[in-house]
Image (cartoon, grey):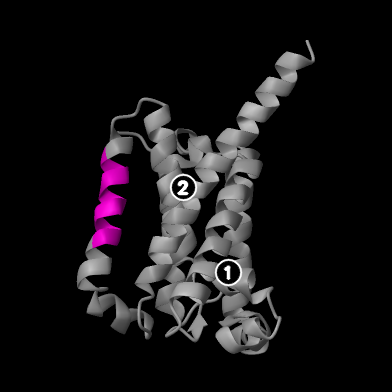
Amino acid sequence: MKFSFSSFPMTPQQLSVPLIVLLISLIAFVFDSSLSELLIYQRTLVTQGEVWRVFSSHFFHTNGFHFLLNAAAVVMLWALHGQFYTIKSYLIVFMMSAITTSIGIHWFSPDIEQYVGLSGVLHGIFIWGAIEDIKAKERTGYLLLLGVILKIAHEQYYGASEDVAVLIGAKVAINAHLWGAIGGVIAVILLFIIKSTVSKDSFDSK
């Protein structure tokens, strides 16, 4: 079988935001010692009003393995569902998943004092992509959606993999995965409302 990049989603709409996410994450990793104190989620500082940390913390990582795992997941999800990516839709899903993850942790996981990483956001993007598969009548969408739901349920019941915790040098914030997935569902609903509103406005203007 001949390999071809043409089989991948390569338009600017499909590529631009994932590439920006990877670039920002790389910059955050390289300059972690200079930037992390100002930008990562720290419960006390967020409570004191430094609310930007709710969003910016997702671009930072505990170590190189953590960064590479998340970067690989960004690429994998792009390869899997990039045909559905647009700049607007990806940004909405990313931002909704990021904010929902951080707010969920802040309100419902008081034991977490500090949080970094893209994993919560990536669960939201995965949920959205699987639902887009289903809407496009791709049977694999049902399997992917069921798979991520079972993964999250397994983590909630049994806890995270100790091997992953050792690899990234930190406790895996499994609740971030749950809240990120919920953010992905909220983003799906929001995008549906936006699309319906635009369609209605277009119809009314005729």
Image quadrant in which you'd find residue 10: top right
What residue appears at the point 38 percent right and 41 percent down from the top-left corner?
130
Question: Which residue occupies the foreground of this view, 113 or 77?
Answer: 113
Left or right: residue 132 versus residue 140 is right
What residue appears at the point 52 percent right and 57 percent down from the top-left corner?
97
Q: Which residues are magenta?
A: 143-153
In the image, residue 96 above or below residue 106: above
Image quadrant in which you'd find residue 22: bottom right
Majority secondary structure in the magenta region: helix
Residue 9 in sight from this viewpoint: no
Number of the front mark, 2 or 1: 2
Q: Going by the picture, which residue comes out furthest to the right?
A: 205
Read off the residue under disc 2: 185
Q: Secondary structure at mark 2?
A: helix
Question: Which residue occupies the foreground of this view, 1 or 206?
Answer: 206
Mark carried by residue 25: 1
Left or right: residue 112 versus residue 28 is left
